[in-house]
Image (cartoon, helix red, strand yellow):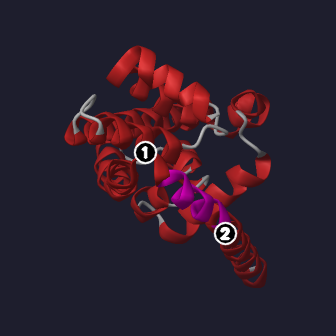
């Protein structure tokens, strides 16, 4: 996977980095942290600039969020259930993003951008419930800044050694999934209790 990202960015520069961020949203198996850190590494070598990598990463992240928002807005749940599998969207991941949105409302667009998996799919329930587009963009942009800045900075600072941090981020994904599942069960329990 890292070779694919390196080739993409190496061959197409900033545009390749943008395409990588788009693919991260559409094909969730490509980690955005790898794309952003690669931009940071290239900035440390003088091939990119630090802020150029940051802004391209941020624009790519927000663009992808808009695409997924529009899928939810115009397609709704029937579209996602029918075609979600072609975008590697698992039913359980969609349920997680639903629970985040139900718990935090529009704040989920801001908070969710800093958690793996949730950061990509949180735009779906926001689009499905037809939340205001401008508000969505503002929350999404602000929420995407810490994640983008952190991984570009890590790539810039650690250079090729950033892989060490990537390993630790991988370890964090399991506890995050457990927390999301617990939130989902809590939400379902509360709904059932009300009925």
Q: Tell me if 99 is positioned left or right of 53 in this view.
A: right
Q: Nearer the viewer, mark 1 or mark 2?
A: 1
Relative vertical location of residue 138 with respect to residue 6 in this rendering, above or below: below
Residue 55: give x, y in percent of width and height: 26, 38
Relative vertical location of residue 163 with respect to residue 18 in this rendering, above or below: below
Residue 189: give x, y in percent of width and height: 76, 80
- Disc 2, SS: helix
Magenta residues span 162-171
Residue 129 in view, yes or no: no
Tag shown at residue 18: none
- Say which quadrant the N terminus sits in: top right
- Say which quadrant the C terminus sits in: bottom right
102 drawn magenta:
no
Rendered image quadrant of residue 188: bottom right
Residue 167 in view, yes or no: yes
168 drawn magenta:
yes
Q: Residue at x 64, y 59 (%)?
A: 170
Relative vertical location of residue 169 with respect to residue 65 in this rendering, above or below: below
Rendered image quadrant of residue 63: top left
Residue matched to label 2: 180
User: Dot 1, crowdedness within 10 Å: few (<14), some or many (≥20)?
Assistant: many
Q: Residue at x 54, y 29 (%)?
A: 5
Relative vertical location of residue 46 with respect to residue 117 in this rendering, above or below: above
Residue 152: give x, y in percent of width and height: 35, 48
Residue matched to label 1: 37
Q: Tell me if 115 is positioned left or right of 132 in this view.
A: right
User: Dot 2, crowdedness within 10 Å: few (<14), some or many (≥20)?
Assistant: some
Camera-side residue of 102 and 180: 180
Residue 70: give x, y in percent of width and height: 49, 32
């Amino acid at each position: 996977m890292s070779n694919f990202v390196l080739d993409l960015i190496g061959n197409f520069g900033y545009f390749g980095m943008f395409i990588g961020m788009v693919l991260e949203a559409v094909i969730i198996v490509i980690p955005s942290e790898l794309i952003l850190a690669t931009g940071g590494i290239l900035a440390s070598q003088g091939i990119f600039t630090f802020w150029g990598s940051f802004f391209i990463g941020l624009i790519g992240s927000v663009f992808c969020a808009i695409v997924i928002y529009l899928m939810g807005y115009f397609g709704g749940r029937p579209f996602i259930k029918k075609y979600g599998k072609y975008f590697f969207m698992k039913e359980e991941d969609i349920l997680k993003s639903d629970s985040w949105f139900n718990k935090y409302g529009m704040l989920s667009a801001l908070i969710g951008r800093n958690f793996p998996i949730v950061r990509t799919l949180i735009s779906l329930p926001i689009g499905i419930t037809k939340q205001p587009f401008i508000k969505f963009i503002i929350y999404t942009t602000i929420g995407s800044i810490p994640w983008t800045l952190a991984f570009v900075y890590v790539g810039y600072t650690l250079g090729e050694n950033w892989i060490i941090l990537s390993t630790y981020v991988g370890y964090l994904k399991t506890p995050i999934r457990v927390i999301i599942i617990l939130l989902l069960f809590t939400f379902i329990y509360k709904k059932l209790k009300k009925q």
